[in-house]
Image (tube, rainbow, N blue to C red):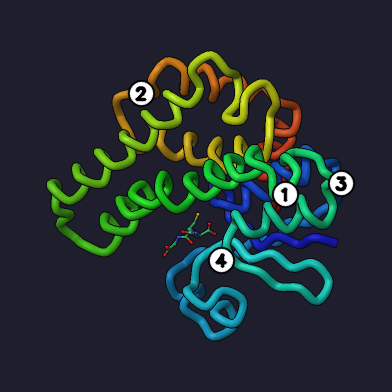
Amino acid sequence: MINLYHVPFTRAFRVIWVCEELAIPYRLTPVDFSPEYRASAEWRKLNPVGKVPVMTDGDLTMFESGAMVQYVLDRYGNGRLQPEAGTPEHAIYLQWSWFAEATFSRPIGETVNHRRAFAEPIQAVLDEMIARARLALAAVDQALAGRPYLLGGEFSAADIMTGYTVMLAERAIKTGLPERAADYWQRLQARAAFKATKAAEQAMGKD
Ligand SMILES: N[C@@H](CCC(=O)N[C@@H](CS)C(=O)NCC(=O)O)C(=O)O
């Protein structure tokens, strides 16, 4: 069974969400998110740079949330939530999935790291990162013109990858989401699988 080492509000959210969309069973294992534990040899064996999440499935152990989502789709998805590999539609699906983490999440995550690393954060550096996040958000907003989801009429895992980052952006960018991105975010939150993901996070550690 898929096992996710997870801390609420962090990136395994994407993997839980894809499992919920596909109705695949999974287990959540809480992780001590302290810098000390994440620097420990025990955790570095699972994630060599000391981040979360980590996923296991039988003998397989993985880090990188986007790669986990893709693995779950390819192994258990039966063609759901992504276009057929090798098609132009799949290329655009990959584009948004990678964009979500490599370009959009990156400056947002770095604002968190910067604040944690420096007792006196440099405002100009934070402003530059937020400006890059706003530009990425504007690209998402533009892509949603006349369509409910990034690939058009159908929800895909690219919306899971991007939806998580929109959630981060909403918190980081104090000026609110642009109109189409705001509607998109409402649409994503209304999904039963999104609600089940939130509920699974909330239930963590309570059993
Ligand atoms: N690209 C990685 C990013 C992982 C990441 O930055 N995780 C955050 C939590 S969501 C973390 O562990 N932050 C602590 C740190 O960077 O020291 C992924 O998608 O899995």
What number is the disc on residue 85? 1
Q: Position of residue 10 (x, y in %)?
A: 54, 51
Asked whether the beta carbons under mark 4 and mark 3 sit within 8 Å of each other, the answer is no
> In the image, 206: left or right of 54?
right
Asked whether the beta carbons under mark 4 and mark 1 sit within 8 Å of each other, the answer is no
Upstream in sequence: badge 4 or badge 2: 4
Q: 180 or 196, which is in the foreground?
A: 180
Residue marked by disc 3? 78
What number is the disc on residue 51? none
Upstream in sequence: badge 2 or badge 1: 1
| Label 1 – label 3 distance at C-alpha | 12 Å
Q: Give residue 172's quadrant in the image.
A: top left
- Secondary structure of the residue carrying tag 2 is loop
Callout 3: few (<14), some (14-19), or many (20+) C-alpha neighbours within 10 Å?
few
Residue marked by disc 4? 32
Q: Amino acid at mark 1?
A: Ala
| Label 2 – label 1 distance at C-alpha | 35 Å
> In the image, 145: left or right of 200?
left
Q: Position of residue 72 (x, y in %)?
A: 76, 54
Q: Amino acid at mark 2?
A: Gly
* Between marks 4 and 3 in the image, the one whose residue lies nearer the viewer: 3
x 52%, y 17%: residue: 183
Upstream in sequence: badge 4 or badge 3: 4
Upstream in sequence: badge 3 or badge 2: 3
Q: Amino acid at mark 3?
A: Asn
Residue marked by disc 2? 176
- Secondary structure of the residue carrying tag 3 is loop
Callout 4: few (<14), some (14-19), or many (20+) C-alpha neighbours within 10 Å?
few
x 67%, y 21%: residue: 153
* Between marks 3 and 2 in the image, the one whose residue lies nearer the viewer: 3
All told, the count of numbered labels is 4
Q: Position of residue 39 (x, y in %)?
A: 46, 78
